[in-house]
Amino acid sequence: MSSRIPAAEITGFYGALIKKFSAKMFGKVPESLGVMWHNQPVLKASMGFGQKLQKWNRCDESLKSYAHMAVASLIGCTWCLDYNYFMAHNHGLDLEKAQQIPRWRDSGVFTPLERDVLEYAEAMSTTPVTVTDELAARLLEQLGSPGLVELTSVIGFANLTTRGNVALGIESEGFADACGLKPLAARSGAR
């Protein structure tokens, strides 16, 4: 990885906890943590919100995971695709679908609801936002108000993390390789 900011040494009690947790989860301490270590309040806030987000349960976990991968694919965050692929493997999600997210429009593996979620994730991630009333209505009917609010917040957080990683030059660290999984599919042409 060659980030735009060199990784700092992770030190202190909090640093030791993060390194221990990371090594247990990933088998190593991601270099990206060293980049974010330069501003520990930002790192703590991001990690804290990410942990809270994982506790939400009004929207199906696979839909939220696929939405985050769609954002990562659209924005070009290889770290997020790699990490989410690793997590999909660890949580028993459909890996064929996870691999196809970068080319979801051309793939036949997704249900109509999953396609709506992937479209919504991309529409929320473009500038300007291109979410249509029709798409939002379909998702509202299928997910209910609490589910759609949750999905929307997950996609917003995905934009925060993916855009930040790309801007800082944080790239894939081989998490999916550690699972012995095939590389992610290449993204098809932008639409």
Image: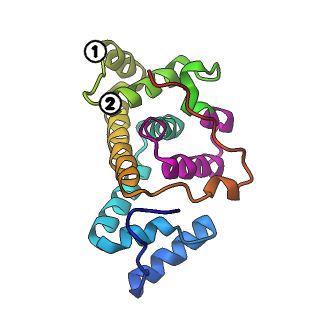
Q: Mark on residue 14?
A: none
Image quadrant in which you'd find residue 134: top left
Magenta stretch in the rendered image: 71-99
Which residue has dot 1 on it?
Answer: 133
Residue at the outermost right position: 180
Above or below, 147 relative to 161: above
Q: Amino acid at mark 2?
A: Thr
**Percent of width and height locating residue 76:** 46, 42
Element under label 1?
helix
x 32%, y 48%: residue? 160
Residue count near mark 1 (Cα–Cα under 10 Å), binned few <14, some 14–19, many ≥20: few
Q: Amino acid at mark 1?
A: Asp
Q: Nearer the viewer, residue 67 or 191?
A: 191
Element under label 2?
loop
Residue 173 belongs to magenta span: no
- Magenta span dominant secondary structure: helix
Which residue has dot 2 on it?
Answer: 126
x 27%, y 27%: residue? 129
Q: Nearer the viewer, mark 2 or mark 1?
A: 2
**Percent of width and height locating residue 119:** 43, 23
Above or below, 66 relative to 173: above
